[in-house]
Image: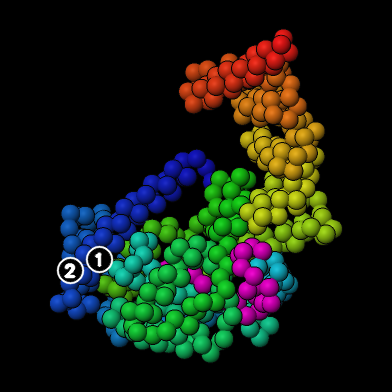
């Protein structure tokens, strides 16, 4: 995408976010009035959010003839297991062992499960704030059944009929017998909102308590250092290599839904259905890609020749899981590649390894990393070297020398670091003076 096109896209998204925020806050205020029906609330919302916008701010879609529409609509699509989404065969989702899902989710309850009984969940809502004022009007579910990967979308076309949506959705989920959930930021957004809507209608939430893989956390560990954004859309393009276009800015979705409620023009909703379906396919794709990386590089596995930046990401996952040994081995492999790591990531890898070796009292390796990083004027390394020579090697002269270098390096950059080096130097000099005094007796 050309630079000017990117700027235009950013402006459109910013304008859409502004409109969506206005609609969201206005709706939350109106929704607190228990004396209004849903129809009256909606009419007031439209009236208030249209004020002052002028013709340029109005929908370009012509109002269509009003006609009766089903209050809850269900859309289904399915994909053969042999179909590829980007470079990922859909069937690979069924090959991920429960141990890997448990590792990615940090939930041992996944160990006896796989994705054949999981539901991928993604909601499209009237706002991003969550809470009782936010309505999920499109619930997208994706799952493996009958040798296919299926996408079922429940669409609320009449806001007053949410109770019916909840009943039909709850019955569907119960009938399917899902045993786990996969989302992208679902722990913070989708599932709390999902459970809230069921609670508001005094209906038990059929997904409550199931093992939950929110892949956003793993995705950030794996790829945040490598890609500009960990948005699902971006990762689908860059990791899965899916040919996915920027269908609709997320902030524009609430606005389109409210316009649809007003005029019944379903062409406003079609892009949202597509966006939701693509998000579910993208989620499957990135989960498979991440699982393959982990499976290929876990302890005891025959490790492949992965990109050094990917190795660093997998190392971060193992570090997060508390497996420092495997993490360190992967960091060493990433550094051994020579090329592929950015300067920042390479430095972070060295810092992590030096900390690991220090913790395990492997002083030769830790010392080598500190000395190497000190040549790049990293003040932290001078501090580590000074501590090593003072407390471990008992070489006070060398401890003062490196601390003095660190002090000079930190001048004018950090008052706290300067004071730390000054105190360190004074303390070591005090030790040296005591040693000389004892020797002279």
Q: Is residue 117 left or right of residue 278?
A: right
Please tell me which residue is depicted at 55% across the width and 21% down the height of the picture: 423
Residue 83: give x, y in percent of width and height.
Answer: 69, 72
Numbered range of the magenta stretch:
103-124
Q: Residue at x 35, y 55 (%)?
A: 16
Report the side of 367 relative to 261 (left or right).
right
Q: CA distance from mark 1 to mark 2?
A: 9 Å
Residue 80 vertical position relative to residue 321 in the rendered view, above or below: below
**Colour convention of the picture:** rainbow
Residue drawn at x 44%, y 49% is 9
Mark 1 is surrounded, within 10 Å at the Cα level, by few (under 14), some (14 to 19) or many (20 or more) other residues, namely: many
Element assignment for label 1: helix
Is residue 260 within the magenta segment?
no
Q: Nearer the viewer, residue 238 or 397?
A: 397
Asked which quadrant contains residue 403, the reply is top right
Residue extending farthest to the front is 441
The C terminus sits in image quarter: top right
115 falls in the magenta region? yes
């Amino acid at each position: 995408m050309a630079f000017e096109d990117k700027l235009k896209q950013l402006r459109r998204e910013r304008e859409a976010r502004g409109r969506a925020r206005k609609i969201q806050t206005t709706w939350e205020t109106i929704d607190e009035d228990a004396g209004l029906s849903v129809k009256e609330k909606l009419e007031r919302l439209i009236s208030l959010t249209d004020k002052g916008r002028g013709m340029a701010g109005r929908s370009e879609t012509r109002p269509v003839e009003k006609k009766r529409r089903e209050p809850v609509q269900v859309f289904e699509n399915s994909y053969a297991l042999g179909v590829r989404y980007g470079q990922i065969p859909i069937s690979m989702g069924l090959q991920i062992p429960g141990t890997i899902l448990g590792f990615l989710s940090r939930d041992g309850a996944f160990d006896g499960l796989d994705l054949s009984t999981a539901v991928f969940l993604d909601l499209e809502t009237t706002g991003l704030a969550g809470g009782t004022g936010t309505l999920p009007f499109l619930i997208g579910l994706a799952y493996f059944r009958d040798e296919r990967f299926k996408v079922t979308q429940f669409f609320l076309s009449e806001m007053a009929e949410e109770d019916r949506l909840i009943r039909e959705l709850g019955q569907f989920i119960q009938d399917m017998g899902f045993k786990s959930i996969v989302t992208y930021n679902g722990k913070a957004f989708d599932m709390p909102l999902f459970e809230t809507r069921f609670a508001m209608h005094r209906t038990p939430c059929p997904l409550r308590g199931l093992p939950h893989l929110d892949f956003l956390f793993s995705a950030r560990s794996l790829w945040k250092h490598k890609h500009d954004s960990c948005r699902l859309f971006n990762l689908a393009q860059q990791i899965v290599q899916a040919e996915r276009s920027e269908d609709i800015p997320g902030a524009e979705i609430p606005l389109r839904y409210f316009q649809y409620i007003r005029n019944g023009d379903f062409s406003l909703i079609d892009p949202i259905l597509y966006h939701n379906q693509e998000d579910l396919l993208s989620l499957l794709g990135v989960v498979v890609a991440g699982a393959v990386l982990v499976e290929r590089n876990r302890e005891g596995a025959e490790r492949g020749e992965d990109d050094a930046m990917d190795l660093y990401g997998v190392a971060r996952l193992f570090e997060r899981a508390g497996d420092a040994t495997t993490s360190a081995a992967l960091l060493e492999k990433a550094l051994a590649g020579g090329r592929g790591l950015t300067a920042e990531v390479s430095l972070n890898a060295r810092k992590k390894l030096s900390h690991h070796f220090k913790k395990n009292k492997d002083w030769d390796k830790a010392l080598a990393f500190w000395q190497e990083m000190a040549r790049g004027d990293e003040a932290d390394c001078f501090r580590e070297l000074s501590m090593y020579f003072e407390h471990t090697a008992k070489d006070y002269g060398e401890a003062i020398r490196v601390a003095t270098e660190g002090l000079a390096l930190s001048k004018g950059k950090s008052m706290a670091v300067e004071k730390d080096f000054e105190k360190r130097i004074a303390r070591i000099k005090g030790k040296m003076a005591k040693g000389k005094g004892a020797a002279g007796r």
